[in-house]
Amino acid sequence: MESIGLLAAGIAVLSGVGAGVGIGIATGKATEAIARQPEMANKITTTLLIGGAMAEATALYGFVVALMLLFVK
């Protein structure tokens, strides 16, 4: 029965992969947008940072769930 918990924890940690891919794509698109309209750099950067924080939060939630699955019984 414990192996199911380990598998679930591993799956929960995989949310970090999605967050990493999402942040990478967003950063690339923000760089393209700033290259096209340099005068909007401040607004684009602010939006990028807010979106990156939200994506990173999902990865942290997955990590917390994995820790809970492993150590809370």
Image (cartoon, rainbow, N blue to C red):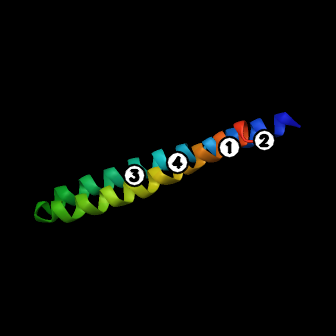
* Of pointers 1 and 4, the one earlier in the residue sequence: 4
Which mark sits nearer the N-terminus, 2 or 3? Answer: 3
Could you give the CA–CA distance between mark 3 and mark 1, rounded to whole angstroms? 30 Å
Q: Residue at x 46, y 45 (%)?
A: 20
Q: Which residue is mark 2?
A: 73
Q: What residue do we see at 59% from left, 45% from top? A: 64
Q: Which mark identifies residue 14?
A: none
Q: Position of residue 19 (x, y in %)?
A: 49, 49
Q: Amino acid at mark 3?
A: Ile
Q: Which residue is mark 3?
A: 25
Judge depth for marks 3 and 1 and give the one in front. 1
The label on residue 59 is 4
- As measured in the structure, the alpha-carbon distance from the residue carrying label 2 to the one carrying label 1 is 8 Å
**Disc 2 residue type (three-letter):** Lys
State which mark lies toward you, 1 or 4.
1
Looking at the rendered structure, the secondary structure element under dot 4 is: helix
Q: Secondary structure at mark 2?
A: loop
User: Which residue is drawn at the image coordinates 32% and 50% (left, top)?
Assistant: 28
Cα distance between the residues tagged 2 and 3: 38 Å
Task: Quickly name the residue at label 1.
Answer: 68
Residue located at (17% from left, 61% from top): 42
Q: Mark 4 near mark 2, Cβ–Cβ under 8 Å? A: no
Check disc 1 and give the amino acid type. Answer: Met
Kind of residue indicated by mark 4 = Ala
